[in-house]
Image (cartoon, helix red, strand yellow):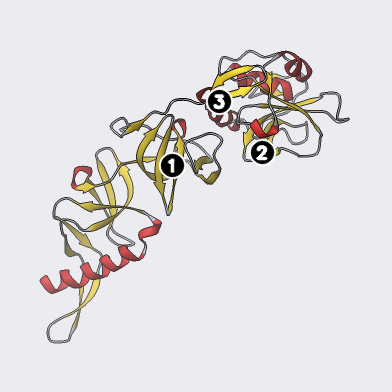
Amino acid sequence: MRLNNILIMGIVSMSIMGTANAAIYGTLKTEIETKSKAAEVVLAQGEEALVDEAVLTLQKGELVKIVAKQEDEYIIEIDEEIKQAVDSEAIDLVGKLTYTAADDTRLRQEASPEADIIDFLKRGELILVLERQDDFYKVKTQDKEGYIYKTQLDETGLSSLPYFKTEAEAVSTESGRVKAESTYIGEEVVDYARQFLGGRYVFGGNSLTRGVDCSGFTQQIMKRFGVQIERSSRAQFASNGYKVSEKELLPGDLVFYGSNGKTIDHVAIYAGNGQIIHASDAKSGIKMSALYYGKPIIGMKRVLS
C-alpha cells in the first residue's frame, strides 16, 4: 500500500502544480489522510491492479487546491472527482477566503473608485482577501490581483485582516471640496440600480418594480440612499448637486441628455467603465448603454455627498 500511496500522491501533486495559476492554494500545517478515486497501480511483480479507494496521506507543508469554503472548513480537491472538507485551521493561507457578493463585481487596479477595472467577477466567486485599504479589499482571484469595494464582498470573518487607512484626498469642484470617500457610495448606488435591469419604462411612473421613466428612475434610486432630488430631468439638472466634467465622472453621477443638444429631455446614472444605466424608453425599459449612446450630452452632475 505504501507504493500505491507514493504513485497516487505523485500524480495528484503534479496535477496541482500544473494548475497553480487557476485556483486558490494553501499549505497544510499538519499531516492529513484522505482518499483518492480508483487508480491502476503497478505491483512489484509488474502486474496491474485496480485500487478502488486508495488511502492518500498528504504531508505537512504540501500544497493543496481550495475550491470552496463552508463555515470553519475548506473544501480541497484531491482529483477531478474527489473533494474533501478539511478544518480551516489545518491550512495556512496568507489572508482569508470569501465570496463575491455582487453581480459584475469590479476588480480594480488600485483601491479607488476611479481606478481602472481589471475584470468583472460573477456573484459567488471564491477569492483570497489579503488586506483592507480604506473601503477596499486587496484580493487574489484566479491569476489576478487587485482591489474590490467592501460591499461587493461577503465580509464575514474579514475583520481580522490588516487594515490600512490613508488620509482622504480632497476632490476639487467648482462648488467646493468634498472628501474622496463620499464618492465610494456611487458603487453601491450602481449595484442597487442594476437590480432593476429589464424593468418597465412608464412615462410619469414612480415605481422601480411597476414602471418608471428616466427621471423617476434616478429619483427613486437616489431616494434609497437618502438623497432627495427633483422629479424631472430638467429640474434635477437645474437644482440638484454640482457640475462635474467627463474627466471627473464617477459611478453614481447623473448624466443629462437632450435630443437637440440644448434642451434636457433625458437623465441616466453613470455606471463606470463608459457605461450608463437608465430607464431608456417604452421599448427597451431599464437598461445599460454606452455613455455616448446617441443623444448628445448636455451636462453631468454629482448629487452624492
- Disc 1 on helix, strand or loop? loop
Q: Is residue 304 left or right of residue 167?
A: right
- Which tag, 3 or 2, sits closer to the chain's start? 3
Depth check, mark 2 against mark 1: the one in front is 2
Looking at the picture, tell me which residue is in the foreground, 287 or 82. 287
Extreme-bottom residue of the structure: 46
- Residue at (44, 25) in percent of width and height: 167
Numbered label attached to residue 124 = 1
- Disc 2 on helix, strand or loop? strand
Q: What percent of the width, then of the height, locates residue 109?
A: 50, 44
- Determine which residue is flagged by label 2: 275
Asked if 266 appears above or below 140 in the picture, the reply is above
Disc 3 crowd, CA 10 A, few/some/many (<14, 14-19, 20+): many
Q: What percent of the width, then of the height, locates residue 265?
A: 81, 24
- Residue at (82, 23) in percent of width and height: 264
Pointer 3 with pointer 2, Cβ within 8 A: no
Numbered label attached to residue 183 = 3
Depth check, mark 3 against mark 2: the one in front is 3
Extreme-right residue of the structure: 260
Amino acid type shown at disc 2: Gln
How far, Cα to Cα, is label 3 from label 2? 17 Å
Numbered label attached to residue 158 = none
Amino acid type shown at disc 1: Gly
Pointer 3 with pointer 1, Cβ within 8 A: no
- Observer able to see residue 1: no
Q: What percent of the width, then of the height, locates residue 86?
A: 22, 48
Which quadrant does the N terminus fall into? bottom left
